[in-house]
Image (cartoon, rainbow, N blue to C red):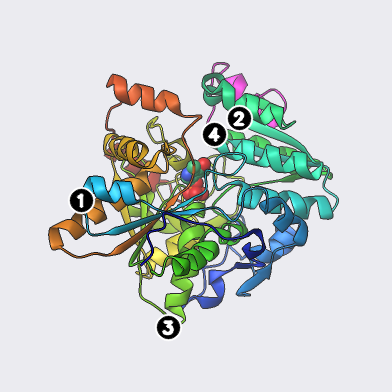
C-alpha cells in the first residue's frame, strides 16, 4: 500500500455522468403526494417551481445522467476534490485503522453545496429563468447558490433566517459579494412574511418561514424559480460526483473502504459520498458498512418516524415519505446549523428503512472535541456539521484498536469551518452545552403528522 497522503485526480477525470441510486434500489421509493388529494403529484405540479430538466431527474430511474459540459467546466474550478489519508490522525489515535477523508471544503463556498447549485443554475439558465429564489439558515446554501448565479448570469434572492442574518454578517457579505440579494426573513416583501410580522413584529424567523417566502416568490413570478440545497432526489444525484471520484481515488490508494461515513442534515453530502459505493454493493459488488451521523439535538434518523410529512413548517410543499421529527419540531440552537432540519431525504430514509444503512447520533461537545483533534493533526478546521462525521470515524478507528483489526474508514469532510469560528470560540470558552431533544416537544410534533395511509 502506498505512503501517499493525498490522492489527486487530473481534471479530465471529473465524472462525465452523475450516479442515480434509484436504478439499483431493491424496492422503489414511495410516491410524492398532493396534500389536498392524497394522490401522487405529476411533473406539472412542480413546473412553477423547478425547470423541467430537474423535474425529470427528480423522477428518473436511469443509473447514469450526463453532466452537461458547462457544469463540468465550472466543476473544474475545484474538482476533482482531494482524497486524503489521515495518517497523522491515525498516529495520534494509535489505531491500525486506515482513515481516508474526501475534502469538499476546497470549493469556492467552502462546502459540497456548489456541486448542486452550479447544476441547478445551469438548467435554470437554459430554460430561460431570470431569477432564483431560495432560503438559507446558516448561509452555506445561500453562498453556494449566489456563486452559481453569478457564474451563469442569474439574479439570486435569498431569504435568510433573521437571527442568522444578524449573527452571521460574513456569510451575508459573501452572498452579496457574489451579487445576490440577501433579505432578512420574515420580510415585508411577501404575503407569508407580512403575516408573520403582523402577529409577531419581533420574529427572528425560521427555516420554515424562509422557505414559504422563497416558494411564494417563485410561484408568483413567471421568470423566477425556486432552488433547494438538499433533500430532493436531483440534489442527491448531483452530489454523487463526490463518491464517484472517491471510488477512483480509493483505487489509486490500493484500498477499499470497509466503512463509509457522512453527516446528514437533509442527507445530500452523505448520499453524495456513499451512494456510488452502495450501488456497487447492490449490484453484487464489495460489501460496505455505511453510517449517517446526526446531532442528538435533532435526531431525525435515530428518533424520528418513517411517515408522510410536509417539507416545511407552513405546509406549502407536497407530502414526502421520510424519517421526520414532525414539521413543527424546532431543534435547540446547536452550532451545526446545517443539521437542524426536521426531515431527511426520502432516498436516505428509504435505505435506512430497508436496513441498507445505519444511523448514529452524537452530542455537540464530543463532536467539537473530535473536530479540534482533527484540526490539530490534519490541519483542516472542519465545519461544525462535518465534525459529526469525524467523531464517528474516530470512534470506529478506536474500536479497530480495541479489536486489533485494521479496517479502512472513509468519511466525507463536507466543509471547512472558517465561517463558524464563533462556534469554536464558544467551545473553548466552555459556553457550549450538550442538548438532547425535548421529549414532550417531539411527541407533540409527531402527533401533528398529517394523516396519510403511510404505504
Ligand atoms: C449544508 C451542510 C451540511 C448538511 O446538509 P446535507 O444536505 O445533509 O449534506 C453538512 N455539512 C456542511 C458543510 C454543509 O454546508
Q: Residues within 10 Å of mark 4 (few under 14, many from 20)?
A: many
Tell me which numbered mark, 2 or 3, is placed earlier along the sequence.
2
Separation of marks 4 and 1 at Cα, in angstroms = 38 Å
- Disc 3 or 1, which lies upstream in sequence? 1
Provide the residue designation for mark 1.
Answer: 94
SS of the residue under disc 1: loop
Judged from this view, the residue extending furthest toward the front is 3
Alpha-carbon span between mark 1 and mark 2 = 44 Å
Q: Are marks 4 and 2 in contact (CB under 8 Å)?
A: yes
Does any portion of residue 181 appear in the rendered image? no
Q: Is residue 356 left or right of residue 277?
A: left
Residue 128 among those drawn in magenta:
no
Q: Tell me the SS state at disc 3.
A: loop
Q: Earlier in the sequence, mark 1 or mark 2?
A: 1
In this orientation, which residue lies closer to the viewer: 186 or 378? 378
Distance from the alpha carbon under mark 3 to that under mark 1: 34 Å
* Front residue of 273 and 434: 273
Front residue of 312/404: it is: 404
Q: Which mark is residue 160?
A: 2
Bounds of the magenta segment:
185-206
Residue at 86%, 50% in the rendered image: 128
Beta carbon at label 1 within 8 Å of ligand 1: no
Residue 287: image location, x then y, percent: 35, 75
Q: Which mark is residue 284?
A: 3
Amino acid at each position: 500500500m502506498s505512503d501517499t497522503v493525498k490522492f489527486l485526480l487530473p481534471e479530465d477525470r471529473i465524472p462525465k455522468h452523475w450516479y442515480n441510486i434509484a436504478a439499483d434500489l431493491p424496492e422503489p421509493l414511495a410516491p410524492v403526494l398532493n396534500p389536498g388529494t392524497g394522490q401522487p403529484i405529476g411533473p406539472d405540479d412542480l413546473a412553477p417551481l423547478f425547470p423541467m430538466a430537474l423535474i425529470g431527474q427528480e423522477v428518473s430511474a436511469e443509473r447514469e445522467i450526463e453532466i452537461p459540459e458547462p457544469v463540468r467546466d465550472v466543476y473544474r474550478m475545484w474538482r476533482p476534490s482531494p482524497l486524503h489519508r489521515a495518517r497523522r490522525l491515525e498516529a495520534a489515535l494509535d489505531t491500525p485503522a486506515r482513515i481516508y477523508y474526501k475534502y469538499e471544503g476546497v470549493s469556492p463556498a467552502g462546502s459540497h453545496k456548489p456541486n448542486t447549485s452550479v447544476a441547478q443554475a445551469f438548467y435554470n439558465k437554459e430554460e430561460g429563468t431570470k431569477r432564483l429564489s431560495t432560503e438559507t439558515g446558516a448561509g452555506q446554501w445561500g453562498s453556494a447558490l449566489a456563486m452559481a448565479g453569478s457564474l451563469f448570469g442569474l439574479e439570486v434572492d435569498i431569504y435568510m433566517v433573521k437571527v442568522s442574518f444578524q449573527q452571521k454578517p460574513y456569510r451575508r457579505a459573501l452572498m452579496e459579494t457574489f451579487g445576490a440579494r440577501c433579505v432578512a426573513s420574515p420580510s415585508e416583501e411577501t404575503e407569508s412574511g407580512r403575516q408573520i410580522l403582523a402577529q409577531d413584529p419581533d420574529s427572528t424567523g425560521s427555516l420554515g418561514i424562509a422557505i414559504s417566502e422563497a416558494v411564494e416568490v417563485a410561484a408568483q413570478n413567471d421568470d423566477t424559480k425556486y432552488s433547494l440545497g438538499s433533500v430532493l432526489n436531483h440534489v442527491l444525484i448531483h452530489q454523487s460526483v463526490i463518491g464517484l471520484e472517491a471510488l477512483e481515488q480509493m483505487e489509486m490508494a490500493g484500498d477499499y473502504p470497509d466503512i463509509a461515513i457522512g453527516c446528514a442534515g437533509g442527507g445530500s453530502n452523505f448520499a453524495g459520498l456513499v451512494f456510488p459505493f452502495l450501488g456497487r454493493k447492490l449490484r453484487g459488488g464489495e460489501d460496505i458498512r455505511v453510517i449517517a451521523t446526526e446531532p442528538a439535538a435533532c435526531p431525525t434518523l435515530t428518533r424520528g418516524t418513517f411517515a408522510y410529512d410536509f417539507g416545511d413548517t407552513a405546509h406549502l410543499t407536497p407530502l414526502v415519505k421520510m424519517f421526520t421529527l414532525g414539521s413543527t419540531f424546532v431543534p435547540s440552537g446547536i452550532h451545526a446549523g446545517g443539521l437542524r432540519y426536521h426531515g431527511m431525504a426520502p432516498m436516505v430514509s428509504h435505505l435506512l428503512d430497508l436496513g441498507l444503512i445505519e444511523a448514529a447520533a452524537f452530542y455537540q461537545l464530543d463532536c467539537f472535541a473530535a473536530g479540534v483533534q482533527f484540526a490539530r493533526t490534519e490541519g483542516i478546521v472542519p465545519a461544525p456539521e462535518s465534525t459529526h462525521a469525524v467523531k464517528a470515524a474516530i470512534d470506529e478507528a478506536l474500536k479497530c484498536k480495541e479489536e486489533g483489526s485494521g479496517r479502512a474508514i472513509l468519511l466525507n469532510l463536507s466543509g471547512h469551518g472558517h465561517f463558524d469560528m464563533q462556534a469554536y470560540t464558544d467551545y473553548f470558552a466552555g459556553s457550549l452545552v450538550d442538548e438532547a431533544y425535548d421529549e414532550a416537544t417531539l411527541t407533540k410534533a409527531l402527533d401533528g403528522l398529517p394523516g396519510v395511509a403511510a404505504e
